Image (cartoon, rainbow, N blue to C red):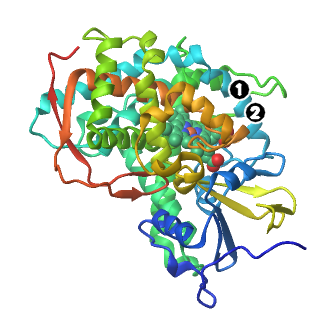
Amino acid sequence: EGTVPIPSPPGLPFLGNIKDINPELPLESFINMADKYGPIYKLNFPGRSMIFVANQELVNEVCDEKRFGKTIGAVLGQVRNGVHDGLFTARNEEPNWGIAHRVLMPAFGPTKIQSMFDDMHDIAAQLAMKWARHGPSAPIHVADDFTRLTLDTLALCAMDYRFNSYYHDDMHPFIEAMGDFLIASGNRSRRPPLPSFFYREADEKYNQDIAMLRDTAEDVLKSRKANPTDRKDLLTAMLDGVDSKTGQKLSDSSIIDNLITFLIAGHETTSGLLSFAFYQLLKHPEAYRKAQEEVDTVIGEGPIKVEHMGKLTYLAAILRETLRLCATIPAFGVGALEDTIIGGKYFIPKGHDVSLLLAKSQLDPAVFGETAKDFIPERMLDDNFERLNKEFPNCWKPFGNGMRACIGRPFAWQEALLVMAMLLQNFNFMFDDPNYNLKIKQTLTIKPKDFFMRASLRHGIT
Ligand code: HEM
């Protein structure tokens, strides 16, 4: 009663809207459909349908945790083959989520993150050194080098493990296995249900990759148990932590699940953020100038210290504005806890998934006005940011929602601020191809495609 059907593009018999999705870049199709069908629409696929919400008002409504909760969609369902009920892929009701969440939250508290600063600095300095050595005429593959940075940072800070990615053209076998595992998880979520022998080869490789991930994490765990340390890293937190509610500790297999989870969840997202941020700086010379000026004023030519981080307010605004325009996780899913109606007229049955299309809702003109698509860091300066979130709750959601929001946010934030500051302090950057226009590569996350820049030293490395 009083409901209207959710707009939906016409589809084919049986296949529904499958052909309407660009398999290389599903995000683009989802955005185009929001442009065409409005802030809520529904796609039909064999055996399931997907509802998208694409403006602040509807996103805000489905962020209400009394009515909607995180769901594990098709792709995350596949990722569970590797990491089971680890933090990211656990269902809300699975006990291991609560145990790991309570044990790990303190490990991401402000003083713990600050204590990781030196390790983050170590890896960032290696990147600066590499770019300095390659010299001003070498094209830098931005997303690749930031991915080396974020992986090495995470492995060092989480478990005192060095991938040393900068010293290899090929990525470490663990990293290759992780990349292939994620791509295969995406593919598996879309493949037609043929008998398993059609997929035998792919499945064998998939299982080998999973074994590689788990064996490596298990080795790290065993060697830590054999050589205890007083390092306060995430592995220590997982080994020592006792859940305040159940009195339980994390099992070995849960620790392995979560070690791999951190590497997966924490590397592409942060490397994408840094890559998009540098793209935006090069496209917006005025913002670039202000950013460099802030670094020169706050830090100068001396060493970067953890105390500087909170003072880099313009850099923080750049990161926020970058994540608004280019959320590296461009959509996430929730499900209705009961039959419900959203937007005053659209019926959502209990259990049905709703995708929050950040790539569209974070550009809502009702919130950001006529300049919604433009890169304007000033609107994200602390006071403005606070005001926006108060007036338009959930207009900026790149770290997810509620109790299932990103646990790694302070980690990513400190790392991204430090890396930007160090690079702006030491280099002048320019596009390798001055005519480059943003193209997107989509896996589980998005990053700029074929984006190269060049770096020339401003003065000696500090
Ligand atoms: C969850 C984004 C960095 C670990 C999430 C979610 C988002 C997100 C959107 C929620 C996903 C959902 O609802 O399905 C990001 C972005 C990052 C970032 C944009 C960087 C800019 C990190 C880092 C780590 C991390 C560095 C690890 C150190 C996690 C974990 C979860 C999560 C474990 C699951 C939390 C839970 O459900 O309890 N992240 N993330 N993330 N993220 Fe991040």
Dot 1 falls on a residue whose secondary structure is helix
Q: Quadrant of the N terminus?
A: bottom right
Q: Amino acid at mark 1?
A: Val
Q: Residue placed at 24% from the left, 11% from the top?
A: 301
Task: Give the number of callouts.
Answer: 2
Q: Residues within 10 Å of mark 1 (few under 14, many from 20)?
A: many
Q: Is label 2 in contact with label 1 (beta carbons under 8 Å)?
A: yes
Task: Read off the residue under disc 1.
Answer: 103
Q: CA distance from mark 2 to mark 1?
A: 6 Å
Q: Quadrant of the C terminus?
A: top left
The foreground one among 431 and 165 is 431
Q: Name above or below for residue 401 compared with residue 108.
A: below
Coordinates of residue 427 in the picture (x, y in percent): 20, 26
The foreground one among 113 and 437 is 437
Q: Is residue 262 visible?
A: no
Q: Residue placed at 26% from the left, 54% from the top?
A: 450
Ligand 1 located in image quadrant = top right
Coordinates of residue 29 in the picture (x, y in percent): 49, 69
Dot 2 falls on a residue whose secondary structure is helix
Q: Residues within 10 Å of mark 2 (few under 14, many from 20)?
A: many
The foreground one among 203 and 298 is 298
Mark identifier at residue 99: 2
Asked whether, in this view, residue 52 is left or right of residue 336, the answer is: left
